[in-house]
Image (cartoon, rainbow, N blue to C red):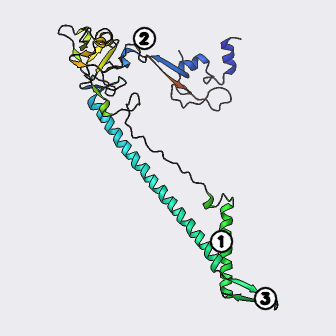
């Protein structure tokens, strides 16, 4: 049976037929993938927050480049947020301690009341010879009062074990324990711990006059090759000079020094986007739709679906 026959069998009233698989795919049902171009990924010398050329570039230990002003504002905002969360957590801890203290005090008073009832409530002495009863140590009124208090105490004990969900005292309360907030500031890109002293200032070498091909700004000071988004760049520690990985491997690494400074390691700078699969950057984006990429509010169409739902769909 062909696709057309199957489609017609599943159809409802005219204008509200069921969608075929290919029609659903065209509307965006399921996982939609799109290849990203060069313009969707920042350049190698752009700030990871501002997405523009970094005027005062600094790099994290993971190789993420930021403009100093933007990353400092981000870390300051995180510190304020951490202080607010910490204040809330400390307030909850203080309330929990106060509640525990109140419960302990209530338990102590209950035990004291029980002791008073057992030792100072009075008792009745029955005489075996006369067959009559006499009150010893208290009056008949006090005996009756003590009995009433004891009965009330028994009722309270019974209420504690009674499974009466309709009573307000038995209604469960939703108590959510707040966890102690993390006090470390994080890199907004990698979400790893990042402190102000971890940032290293980057020193670029500008291209020579007349060699600004395609708007290039910087070059390797060793090989004099212009930096592009496809270039592998490393930042020398602790001087912060940016050189190509080729220069680091073949020249600087063996010498152990550069520009009169001892090299204690390198930070591999994250490359910019080039649009090629082998560039090391994200070149594909995908998202999943349960009801299609349209409004998402349209109901199912076809037989036994109630009234027809026409919301402007057109098929060419």
Corner quadrant of residue 250: top left
Corner quadrant of residue 239: top left
* Mark 3 Cα-neighbour bin, 10 Å: few <14, some 14–19, many ≥20: few
Query: Viewer-proximal residue, 114 or 59?
Result: 114
Residue lying at 24% horizontally and 14% vertically, measured from the top left: 218
With 152 as the anchor, is 210 left or right in this view? left
Check if mark 3's residue and mark 2's residue have beta carbons within 8 Å: no
Residue 305 appears in the rendering: yes
**Badge number at residue 100:** none
What secondary structure is marked by label 1? helix
Query: Viewer-proximal residue, 277 or 122?
Result: 122
What secondary structure is marked by label 2? helix
Residue lying at 28% horizontally and 15% vertically, measured from the top left: 256
Q: Which residue in the protein does label 2 denote?
A: 278
Which label lies toward us, 3 or 1? Answer: 3
Mark 1 vs mark 2, CA separation in Å: 79 Å
Mark 3 vs mark 1, CA separation in Å: 29 Å
> From this viewpoint, which residue is outermost toward the bottom?
130
What secondary structure is marked by label 3? loop
**Residue 203 percent location from the top left of the image:** 24, 20
* Mark 2 Cα-neighbour bin, 10 Å: few <14, some 14–19, many ≥20: few
Which label lies toward us, 3 or 2? Answer: 3
Mark 3 vs mark 2, CA separation in Å: 106 Å
With 209 as the anchor, is 202 left or right in this view? right
Q: Quadrant of the N terminus?
A: top right
Query: Viewer-proximal residue, 126 or 283?
Result: 126
**Residue 59 percent location from the top left of the image:** 31, 25
**Badge number at residue 153:** 1
Mark 3 or mark 1: which comes first in sequence? 3
Mark 3 or mark 2: which comes first in sequence? 3
Q: Which residue in the protein does label 3 denote?
A: 127
């Amino acid at each position: 049976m062909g696709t057309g026959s199957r489609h017609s069998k599943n159809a409802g009233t005219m204008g509200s037929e069921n969608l075929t698989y290919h029609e659903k795919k065209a509307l965006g049902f399921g996982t939609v993938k799109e290849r990203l171009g060069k313009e969707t990924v920042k350049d190698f010398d752009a700030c990871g927050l501002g997405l523009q050329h970094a005027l005062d570039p600094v790099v994290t230990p993971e190789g993420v480049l930021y403009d100093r002003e933007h990353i400092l504002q981000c870390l300051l905002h995180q510190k304020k947020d951490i202080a607010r969360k910490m204040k809330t957590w400390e307030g909850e801890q203080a309330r929990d301690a106060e509640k525990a203290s109140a419960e302990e005090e209530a338990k102590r008073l209950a035990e004291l009341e029980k002791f008073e009832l057992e030792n100072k409530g009075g008792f009745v002495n029955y005489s075996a010879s006369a067959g009559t009863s006499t009150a010893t140590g208290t009056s008949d009124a006090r005996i009756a009062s003590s009995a009433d208090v004891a009965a009330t105490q028994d009722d309270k004990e019974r209420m504690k074990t009674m499974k009466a969900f309709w009573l307000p005292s038995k209604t469960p309360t939703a108590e959510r324990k707040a966890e102690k907030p993390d006090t470390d500031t994080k890199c907004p890109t990698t979400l790893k711990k990042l402190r102000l002293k971890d940032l290293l200032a980057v020193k670029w070498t500008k291209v020579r006059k007349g060699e600004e091909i395609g708007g290039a700004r910087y070059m390797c000071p060793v090989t004099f090759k212009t930096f592009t988004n496809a270039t592998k760049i490393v930042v020398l520690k602790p001087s912060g000079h940016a050189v190509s990985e080729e220069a680091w491997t073949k020249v600087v690494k063996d010498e152990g020094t550069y520009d009169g400074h001892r090299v204690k390691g390198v930070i591999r700078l994250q490359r910019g986007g080039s649009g090629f699969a082998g560039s090391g950057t994200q070149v594909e984006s995908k998202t999943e739709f349960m009801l299609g990429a349209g409004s998402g509010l349209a109901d199912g169409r076809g037989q036994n679906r109630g009234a027809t739902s026409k919301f402007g769909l057109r098929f060419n």
